[in-house]
Image: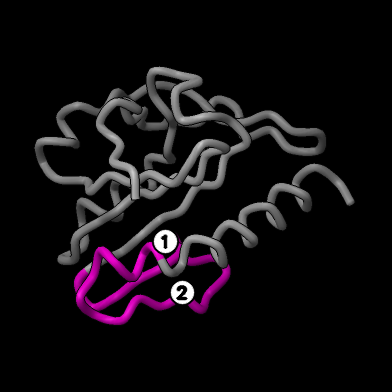
Amino acid sequence: MNQLEKDLKFGLCGEKNIYEKLKTISSSKISKTLNKFAIMDFESDDFVIELKTRRIKSNTYCDIMIGVNKINYIRETKRRGIIAYQFKDGDYYVEITDDVFNKLRLDIGGVERAGTNDIKKMCYYIPTNILKKF
């Protein structure tokens, strides 16, 4: 199994583990998106939710990256948008409001794994001090 496959498996396990916590933020039923290529991982009538599972602690960096496409999708949808993170030390989230959007930093970033080159993509960076613990 290559690193990309390991990362995908790690992320899928994270989705199963956080589902109950996600249900606490929406009054309507939250569902896993059916299309594996969907921009967001979960949705409900009033929310879209992206989950990122990370192998670091929440305070390892002063900010944490998220793809521009995720934030753009949230900004364009009529539903509220949540970015959730599973870190080694707990599960956190932030709702992308106008106020939060103004705190994001846009910069080049990405991940580097054997067999892929996702580095040098535009990313938003969310300050970790605005993340809320579930």
Image coordinates of residue 122 in percent, x first then y, are 43, 30
Q: Which residues are magenta?
A: 21-46
Image coordinates of residue 22 in percent, x first then y, are 36, 64
Q: Quadrant of residue 103?
A: top left
19 inside magenta stretch: no
Local secondary structure at mark 1:
loop
Tell which of 17 and 37 is nearer to you: 17
Residue visible at 19% across and 72% down? 46
Q: Is residue 35 left or right of residue 28?
A: right
Q: Is residue 84 left or right of residue 87?
A: left
Tell which of 50 and 75 is nearer to you: 50
The residue at the far right in this view is 1
Residue visible at 31% across and 81% down? 29
Image coordinates of residue 111 in percent, x first then y, are 62, 31
Comes first in the chain, label 1 or label 2: 2
30 inside magenta stretch: yes
Q: Which mark is residue 33?
A: 2
Q: Main secondary structure of the magenta part?
A: loop
**What residue is pinned by disc 1?**
40
Q: Is residue 3 left or right of residue 98?
A: right
Name above or below for residue 108 compared with residue 115. above
